[in-house]
Structures are given as C-alpha cells and as structure tokens.
Amino acid sequence: MTIPTLLTERLRLRPVLSGDVDLMIELGCNPAVMQYVQPVMSAEDTRKVMPILMDYPHSDDLGHWVVETREDNMPVGEVSLGFLPLNRPDVVPDLKAGDVNYSDEVEIGYLYLPSAWGKGYATEAAARLLAYAFNDIFLKKIVAVTDDRNHSSQKVLTKIGMRHTGDRHAYGYDVQGFEIRADEWKSKAKST
C-alpha cells in the first residue's frame, strides 16, 4: 500500500511529489518555520532529503503529505507519520543506510508556511492523519514531540486529543512528549 490522498473539509493531503521541492525548500529554509524543529536547512540539503519525503523507506503506510487548500490547490505545509527518531545526525542523514536510530513508535509531525498559521489547518490535517492511522492502517498509538517553547504546536496536539506525557528524548534532545492510543481516540470520536 502506498500512502493515499486524504481529504478534510478545507484541505487535501497528498503524497509529496518531486515538483514539491520548492515548497520543501520554503519550509526548511525559513527560520520562523524551523525555530522549534531543527536548524534551518540549506536548499541543497532539502533537495537531498526529497527522495525520503517522496518514498518513506520504512513503511508503505507511513510517509509525508503536502497539505494544500481544496479551494485553490495552494500548498500550505507538510504533515507526516513516521517512526520517531531518537538521535539527530549533524549531517543530512541517509535514512536507508541507518544513520538514524528509531524507536518503534509512530510520530505525527507537521510544518506550515507562516501565511497558513492561525487558520486551523494544522489541527484539521493532524486530526485527519489520526483517523487514517487508527481507522485505515490500524496503528495502536501515535506519539508527538515538541520543543518546550512551542506552545502553538502543543495546543494543536491537545486539540486533537493527545495527552501530554512529560519529558522524553527524541531527535537527540529532551523534548515534551504527547500520545494518544487508538482506544482513546475512538472513545473521544464517539463522544463528539
């Protein structure tokens, strides 16, 4: 199975394509976007990771999606489901060669252009990814991590029903952890 295109009321989440390199450079090279994520990437390094964004090497069910508005097909960000990295190499990793050590936990992640901030897109797309994770590929749990200072991202995670689990280690740093189990998500979905 390859990752499907997913729809919400306002958004289309579609697999990353080679033509999305400009969006990925715009996200990865923007200090405001990357402030709480990782050091700003160069355009060259972003191009190097494009094959991984287009074809996630660890699972056919997980990967990266471009988020675009359905009204005008405008790309506004990127979301992902993938195995949570425990370390972060100093160079752009060759993920297929094993430069990164992964946990067995699946993480939800996202990056948005500043022009998309404050419009509810992150919450809407992340909620749709949880539905895909629990209803379509039958995962048992999803985790997320944020920098301690990234209150906006933490707010998105709690809005989609994730619980704050405290300090944990990921990406080579101490970060704030969040999680939701499938049974918790299904219970919350029934009550709304």
Image (cartoon, grey):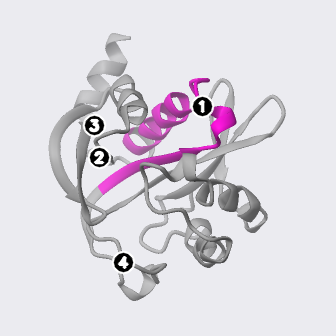
Q: Name the residue under label 2.
A: 143
Q: How far apart are marks 4 and 3 (CA)?
A: 31 Å
Q: Name the residue under label 4.
A: 89
Q: Quadrant of the C terminus?
A: top left
Q: Earlier in the sequence, mark 2 or mark 1?
A: 1
**Which span of residues is magenta-colored?**
106-134
Is 24 a magenta residue? no
Q: Nearer the viewer, residue 112 or 192?
A: 112
Q: Name the residue under label 1.
A: 117
Q: Position of residue 61 (x, y in %)?
A: 47, 59
Residue pushed farthest bottom? Answer: 97
Asked whether residue 42 appears in the rendered view, the answer is yes
Query: Which residue occupies 49% across, 52% down?
Result: 80
Q: Which of marks 3 and 2 is nearer the N terminus?
A: 2
Is 109 a magenta residue? yes
Q: How far apart are marks 1 and 3 (CA)?
A: 28 Å
> Which amino acid is tagged 4?
Pro
Q: Earlier in the sequence, mark 4 or mark 1?
A: 4
